[in-house]
Amino acid sequence: MKDQQIFKQYIDLLPFLAAVLGNECEIVIHDLTNPQASIIAIKNPVSGRKKGDALTHFAQEILDQGLYHNQDFIANYNGQSKHHDFLSSTFFIKNGKTIIGMLCINKNLTPAKHTMFALENLLKSYNLIQNQEKNITEQFDSSIVDIAKSRIQEIIARQKVPVAYMSIEDKLTVLQKLKDDAILDTKGSIQEVVAQLHVSIPTIYRYLKRIK
């Protein structure tokens, strides 16, 4: 099958996906043969992008690292535009074993975050949120791995934002605290952080380069 025939199959799905997922869910198809103008179709352009815009730096990084060789998609990683935070997923469009494009779905988290912050402020006004200073946990696990796992869970919980709605800055804050507490030096900690923050190992190492 020719590449353009494959792309047409995915492009024809866009109206259906847009109707199912809703207006706050951006759906993009990239043609990787032209990275500088890779977007060949887009629905619900919440990020402000348009047909003919370039491939993102992260998408180019996926290609450079060859992540598409051993997996068909990457799900639920964080994305950002100038005004919005997204929960993003990318499906690799292939012709045989050759990658030719990407189908990207970007869920706009900004309205949900605003609602969460409003709810939190409402709960605070009625003194219905537990004082963080009193939120003390004693750890009885004997294993270093278990202790590290629990400590990671505790630090993530302190952000008071569900992982699915965390921005990159939220995750950098978590990593900074884990680094300051030397949690990241323990065996298996990186894999545990990857699992709990729902990101890839390359993403974690990219974040670590950004903290002190």
Image (cartoon, helix red, strand yellow):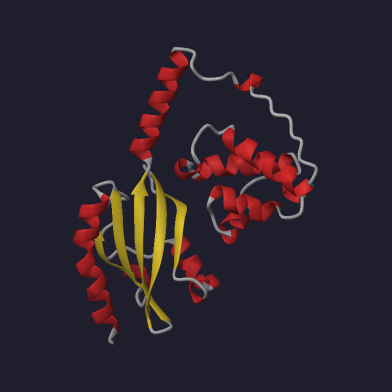
Q: At x 54% / y 54%, what residue is drawn? A: 199
69 displayed left or right of 22: right
Q: Nearer the viewer, residue 152 or 98?
A: 152
Residue reaching furthest bottom? 1
Q: Position of residue 143 (x, y in %)?
A: 79, 46
Q: At x 68% / y 45%, what residue is drawn? A: 149
- Whether 108 is drawn above or below 2: the answer is above
Residue 51 appears in the rendering: no
Q: Quadrant of the C terminus?
A: top right
Locate residue 10: give its quadrant.
Answer: bottom left
Residue 204 appears in the rendering: yes
Q: Position of residue 116 (x, y in %)?
A: 40, 30
Q: Nearer the viewer, residue 43 or 149?
A: 149
Locate residue 95: give its quadrant.
Answer: bottom left
168 displayed left or right of 183: left
Q: At x 61% / y 22%, what residue is drawn? A: 132
Q: Position of residue 191 (x, y in %)?
A: 65, 56
Q: At x 70% / y 51%, what residue is drawn? A: 189
